[in-house]
Amino acid sequence: RAGRVIIHGDFSDFLGCDGETPWSATVVGENGLYKGGPADVSLSAFALAEGEFASAEASASVRLEGSPPITRITRCPRGGNDGFEAGVVNQNVIPCWTVADQEGGAGSWCNQTGTTPPQGPCAGSLTSVAAPPEGLQAAMTNQSGPGSHVLYRCGVLRSQRISFELYINNEANVFFNPSSLDYGVFPNQQFRADLVTAAGMAADPFTVATADILLSLYQTRPGDPPVSGYTTVTADASAYVRQDVCLRFAEVENQFFFHAGVDDVSIDLLERGRHGTSH
């Protein structure tokens, strides 16, 4: 019931010849976080130093402490996925949402949990980030090189108010916001959230054309603090009720690592013939 678990890992560093070297691992079972219980552990280690080689092996029976298994939903729930609890951590398939990455770039938007940036298709920086403010998961960017990434949902807008929780961690420490989401435009290091026409998004998910941007919800600016905890962003979208729109979160970086996180989105979209109503 706890699920089978395999722990594996390696490290390499300049270490002294005595003392202890700590090692830790996140344990994940077949059906979510490991519940805990007895386990057999084996360890193989080797060391190289100025032409000398040494190796050792050890094994032991231990008891692992853990959390109850969590079942991950991999399809769009009937009520939407505005808290990003559906989907698999460290994957860029986010139920109810569409992820698009500019061709040739690195990184993506992925499901994220805890205080480590998402890995998998988002693999890159391992710097600590803020934990999701609502539930266990958020959507967050990470990358190993320059790229441009958008996360969006489309439908007929039925709510006058839009809100979401936003986290920013710009390891470049400076923002640049040209009128482009192309990571080939240099320098470009920005996050923006927009309400965009559905037609504009269908033609180009990275559009910043004035005719396509209905409402700017948020945009980083040069001089903004590079790191912020999750903060609430709200906007009045009453002028666009009953229109076909897309809520889009966009992040582009060609300076250094950039983690943008969103969670607890509040919007009422009627998604035509796809997922029904979400809140």
Image: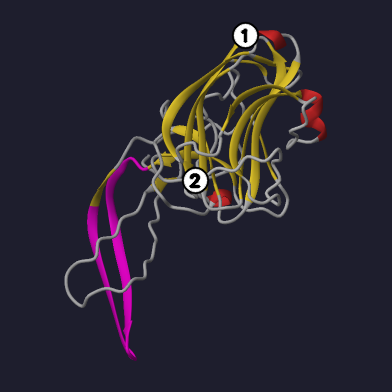
Viewer-side residue, 111 vs 1: 111
The secondary element bearing badge 2 is classed as loop
The circle on residue 17 is none
What's the colour scheme?
A: secondary structure
Q: In the image, what residue occupies the spot 30% across and 65% down?
A: 42
Find the residue positioned furthest to the bottom: 51
User: Is 8 situated above or below 46?
Assistant: above
Q: Amino acid at mark 2?
A: Pro
Q: Position of residue 86 (x, y in %)?
A: 53, 30
Q: Position of residue 112 (x, y in %)?
A: 48, 39
Q: Which residues are magenta?
A: 34-62
Q: Is residue 39 magenta?
A: yes
Label 1 and label 2: CA atoms lie apart by 32 Å
Quadrant for the C terminus, please: top right
Q: Which residue is mark 2?
A: 118
Q: Position of residue 64 (x, y in %)?
A: 26, 48
Nearest-to-viewer mark from 1 and 2: 1
